[in-house]
Image (tube, rainbow, N blue to C red):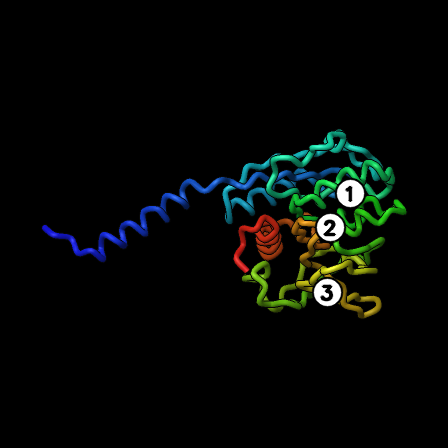
Amino acid sequence: MRIPLWILLCGLLVVPAIQAAETATPLRVLLITGGCCHNYPFQSAQLTNAVARHARVDWTVVNEGGTGTRAEIPLYARPDWARGYDVVVHNECFADTTAPAYIRRITAAHHAGVPAVVIHCAMHTYRATDIPDWREFLGVTSRHHEHMSRYPVKKVLPEHPILKDMPADWVTPMDELYVIEKVWGDTRPLATSASEKDGKEYPVAWTHTYGSARVFGTTYGHSDDTFRDPVFLNYVSRGLLWAAGRLKE
């Protein structure tokens, strides 16, 4: 029996596509967590499980530094601490660590091109230092937050792929609103929430480029309920893929 040429051509196109999908290299992601004020083991489990619904990922989870506000964790002692990773997720909380050389060892890796996701208290990490490097890396400056509440979220760039499937009327679980004092460089707010105190709109999710690295940030992520919320987990997962260059614009 003769097989029409168009069927053969379709077979040639489809089979490699399937094979490519099956053999796609997993993302190598480093999740750094620990410090003050949050349930990091729970958050880490929720995040890794959520991202697994979107992509194959080989995770390395580092939880060091105890539960205080000051620590210089062993991971960052190595100049090549980020080598080999496609994305680094910062979900640590060490507000009172101030050592410039230590902080610049972290930011240098990202400035050289290692993409990042920064979550919640990462914005207040190293806030006691005078050097601006960490805040420039984050894309925002924040030194305090407002009270816990359920905050309505306004999509500023509703067509951005990170916000795909986010409802237009999404309201957070009980969480903290971070006051953003400054937006750095090319930072693009994706979504905002209004303060219940002064009525101002503050970025709660954004994209940013630091050196040659993509950075995605969100200030929400305080409570366990937030890390149970499928809307939150979806946009953070998509933000991670965007940072890694795996999410279509």
Q: Which kind of residue does numbered mark 3 sit on?
A: Ser
Q: Which kind of residue does numbered mark 1 sit on?
A: Cys
- Disc 2, SS: helix
In the image shown, does 187 or 92 lie closer to the viewer?
187
Q: CA distance from mark 2 to mark 1?
A: 9 Å
Are the residues flagged by discs 2 and 1 in contact, CB closer than 8 Å?
Answer: yes
Residue 57 location, x and y as percent?
53, 40
- Disc marking residue 164: none
Locate residue 224 relative to residue 53 in the image: left or right: right
Are the residues flagged by discs 1 and 3 in contact, CB closer than 8 Å?
Answer: no
Q: Which kind of residue does numbered mark 2 sit on?
A: His
Q: CA distance from mark 1 to mark 3?
A: 22 Å
Q: Earlier in the sequence, mark 3 or mark 2?
A: 2
Residue 196 location, x and y as percent?
80, 66
Locate residue 132 relative to residue 19 in the image: left or right: right
Taking the spot 65% from the left edge, 51% from the top edge, the residue there is 214
Look at mark 2 in the image and give the residue it sits on.
120
Mark 2 Cα within 10 Å, few/some/many (few <14, many 20+)? many
Q: Quadrant of residue 146?
A: bottom right
Q: Quadrant of residue 184?
A: bottom right
Look at mark 3 in the image and give the residue it sits on.
193
Look at mark 1 in the image and give the residue it sits on.
93
Q: Earlier in the sequence, mark 2 or mark 1?
A: 1
Residue 66 location, x and y as percent?
78, 33
Could you tell me if residue 43 is visible in this image? no
